[in-house]
Image (cartoon, coloured by chain):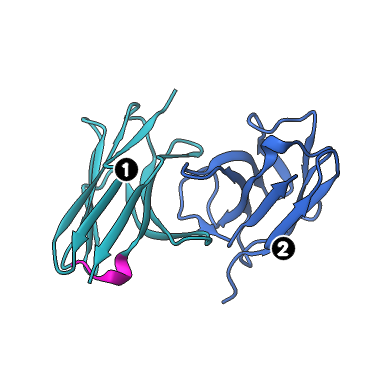
Amino acid sequence: EAGVVQSPRYKIIEKKQPVAFWCNPISGHNTLYWYLQNLGQGPELLIRYENEEAVDDSQLPKDRFSAERLKGVDSTLKIQPAELGDSAVYLCASSFLPGGTDTQYFGPGTRLTVL
Amino acid sequence: KQEVTQIPAALSVPEGENLVLNCSFTDSAIYNLQWFRQDPGKGLTSLLLIQSSQREQTSGRLNASLDKSSGRSTLYIAASQPGDSATYLCAVSAYKYIFGTGTRLKVLA
């Protein structure tokens, strides 16, 4: 069974440029999470989807970040414009059951460097 | 607001030693607690999940315990091996997961 797929694995951009990350969760997993992980820190939740509905986006900086999961399967996270402080690893995870009640499976992450 | 703390931040042990990693949390109203392993440059791999009604879970050389009333969990690793070297993160869940900052473990051959 394929795990959580993320692309790209690495991205280097200049500040003020846009960037997008893509995630395909494990087949059958209705819950999808986007996390941000800074160096030496644990992941911090940005947004959680149950199917195509964003049920928790309280930590998403909505002035520059956006996300979508149109058909309730794969998802895209976008930053526009990127700032130096956005340099981090962006992790996608999925689970079968909703709301933090179940094991989460993580993708390898996208390492973003903003110059 | 839930806060999760992991002690120690880093640990080096000789191969074969048994060791304990600690995780504490401030709000006992949780669904479950999960221990993860993260290798450098990689995503997180789930090791053990303990439901709030459980006291412990075991998988191979790993044993995790949960004491909700005191807000503590421990991850016990028996007979450590160099391949166990990684960062270990705990996360508590109440609608969403809150992660600790991790313990960086190095097992010396």
Residue B89 screen position, x and y as percent: 38, 49
Q: What element carries label 2?
A: strand
Amino acid bearing label 1: Ala
Magenta region, main secondary structure: helix
> Could you tell me which quadrant the N terminus of chain A lies in?
bottom right
Q: Can residue A105 be seen in this view?
A: yes
Q: What residue sits 75% from the left and 44% below the top?
A: A115
Q: Which of A95 and A108 is in front in this view?
A: A108
Number of the label disc, if any, that sits on residue A7 = 2
> Which segment did they paint magenta?
B80-84
The local crowd at label 2, few if under 14, some if 14 to 19, many if 20 or more residues have their Cα within 10 Å, is some
Q: Which of A2 and A112 is in front in this view?
A: A112
Q: Nearer the viewer, residue A64 or A92?
A: A64
Q: Is mark 1 on a helix, strand or loop?
A: loop
| Front of the two marks 1 and 2 | 1
Does residue B43 lie above or below A46 as drawn?
Answer: below
Amino acid bearing label 2: Ser
Given the image, what chain letter belongs to the residue carrying mark 1? B
In the shown orientation, is residue B34 left or right of residue A101?
left
Q: What residue sits 22% from the left and 72% below the top?
A: B109
Number of the label disc, if any, that sits on residue B37 = none
> Seen from this angle, which residue lies furthest left?
B17
Does residue A29 lie above or below A113 as drawn?
Answer: below
Q: Nearer the viewer, residue B43 or A40?
A: A40
Instruction: Give the quarter of the image for residue B38.
Output: bottom left
Q: Which chain is blue?
A: A
Residue at the disc numbered 1 = B9
> Seen from this angle, which residue lies furthest front?
A115
> Seen from this angle, which residue lies furthest top?
B1
